[in-house]
Image (cartoon, rainbow, N blue to C red):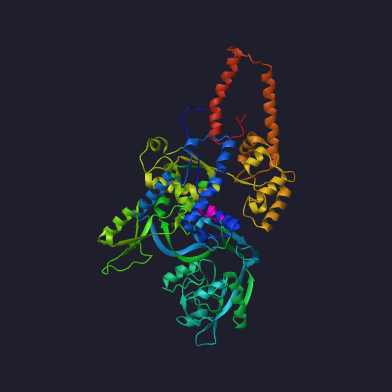
Amino acid sequence: MKGRTTLWVPGSDHAGIATQVVVEKTLWKEEQKTRHDVGRDGFIEKVWQWKHAKGDRISHQLRRLGSSVDWERYCFTMDPKLCTAVVEAFVRLHDEKIIYRSTRLVNWSCTLKSAISDIEVDKTELTGRTLLPIPGYKEKIEFGVIVSFAYKVDGSDEEIVVATTRVETMLGDVAVAVHPDDSRYTHLHGKYVVHPFCKRKLPIICDTYVSMEFGTGAVKITPAHDHNDYEIGVRHNLQLITVIDDEGNITGDCGEFTGMKRFHARKAIMDALKKMDLFRGVADNPMVVPICSRSKDIVEPLIKPQWYVKCDEMASKATEAVRSGELKITPESHAKIWYRWMEGIRDWCISRQLWWGHRIPAYFVTVNDPSIPKGEEIDNEYWVSGRTIEEALSKAAARFKVDSSKITLRQDEDVLDTWFSSALFPFSVFGWPNNTKDLNVFYPGSLLETGHDILFFWVARMVFFGQKLLGKLPFKEVFLHPMVRDAHGRKMSKSLGNVIDPMDVITGISLEQLHKQLYDGNLDAKEIEKAKEGQKRDFPKGIPECGTDALRFALCAYMSQGRDINLDILRVEGYRFFCNKIWNATKFALSYLGEDYKFANNSVSKYFIHNLFLRYPKQCNILRMYIFIIGDKK
């Protein structure tokens, strides 16, 4: 409208976890095979086949909505050009020690068998006793309770009662902690309690982390399965005993419980404690349950070696960019959330135990020289990165001062978090790391428009990498739109049957066809029936044909609703009637002009053109304020 050069680059990411889960389910549904049955290369080929068959759906939706993107520039995060950028970014950041390897507690999804980042964990608040469905279990599992049991003091008739919401982790207990000023336990300082199942002696330690007012004032310590306990374990140099494996089963020297699923072991342990007269009760307990946003499994803290990105320095610069006004976030309320998140930032775990994605360009070094000790997986010194294996080999030889013929390299099996490649998108699409003409012309961009739910998944990380790798913010302004929910305010979910496909709104769809779409996914029979009931309630007559204009009009009208858009199809249908009236009125007026009508350059025409010109700056200001449904406040 202002005659300026503009560019909107379309693209999509490879959705590592979500895509792998879908393809694994499809593979099992169609061939009764797991990814391990077909092997890594075979599975990746299956993913590409699925991508070619299903991956254009979003692009098709954008086309039908009339999005004015440059389709010739469309990019996919697994395209060769973007893969080159991913490797380059990793190697540069690893060489600067911003990317490093560390063994620590991670958020582990037993369903995905992969680590996930902090912001991929949904914190679900429970007010008390609640039954939750858990992947891999036929029955629902009880949460929102706290279990009390006793540890017998070694060589004494005394006992210490502790309480936990995860009694299965007591198999990995290595200590009992009390507050040093708690007079109830002063006489027990330096003594031990005895583990009832393995007869392991657990020291009674003193730590100010313990609250004397909460419960009995004594806390069981399981450093390998709890973040707070891990910190205590580090302070007191306690042993790490892992008792839950990658699949969520009890592992190690745990007697009769070894091999049980973790939540089955929960009940079995309580039964065993009752038989030993060590069970002291169970009570309702308001709590927050960590749930994997991808798999809906309960997140299990596990000790794992992973790759991390140091974020503190980048977060500090990102905070200052917003505070100084160099980067503007709209609505302004999200700036406060930005500051709060940046202040409490933790290093970003970027490795995922998946097959679909960018394989990490890092190599573990083995030196075939008896004078050089063998390295451990946790030792950063024995890991090198490289744009090619030849570069990695050269780095390893130089580091250990040996000939390259004595070096053996093994590439890490893990892949990078999808958001790593997405964070590079503002400049990788223009050919970075090459100094291209497009990069010089179009980077940095002016505006990023996205949903507020991925402010930290994506926006923050683009800012991090833009400033770190190019020394410039990737954009000047971020506009965050509300999240689209169903008419009742619920998050859209296939299992609820309330997902609204833009194409179905544009072209219309019958209830029968909506039902048929459910069978194209990976819902089980019970979920399909539940989804059908949801569709019957929300769309008893299907979804009427509303057209592109009505859908766009509705989305613009909803922009003033706040953080969420409760999309009501009846309201969209109302806008269809409105658009039809405008169309018919215009068609009626044009019918009087005739095919041979020519524009008359008279005073009346000039008057209308002049008034239109006067409205132009007002219209620009209104749009600049992101008011899309009102052309003029008057």
Q: Nearer the viewer, residue 614 or 304?
A: 304
The residue depicted at 62 percent of the width and 54 percent of the height is 522
Q: Nearer the viewer, residue 440 or 377?
A: 377
Q: In this rendering, would 594 be left or right of 161? A: right
Q: How many marks?
A: 0
Q: Is residue 574 above or below residue 533?
A: above
The residue depicted at 40 percent of the width and 62 percent of the height is 102
Find residue 255 and report its horizontal and vertical position in percent.
Answer: 53, 79
Q: In this rendering, does residue 488 appear at all?
A: no
Q: Quadrant of residue 57?
A: top right
| Majority secondary structure in the magenta region | helix
Q: Is residue 606 above or below residue 277?
A: above
- Region rendered in magenta: 15-21
Q: Is residue 157 above or below residue 250?
A: below
- The quadrant of the image that shows the C terminus is top right
Q: In this rendering, would 4 be left or right of 144? A: left
Find residue 453 and report its horizontal and vertical position in percent.
Answer: 55, 49
In the orientation shown, which residue stands out farthest toward the right? 540
Q: In this rendering, would 411 be left or right of 613? A: left
Q: Is residue 411 above or below residue 540?
A: below
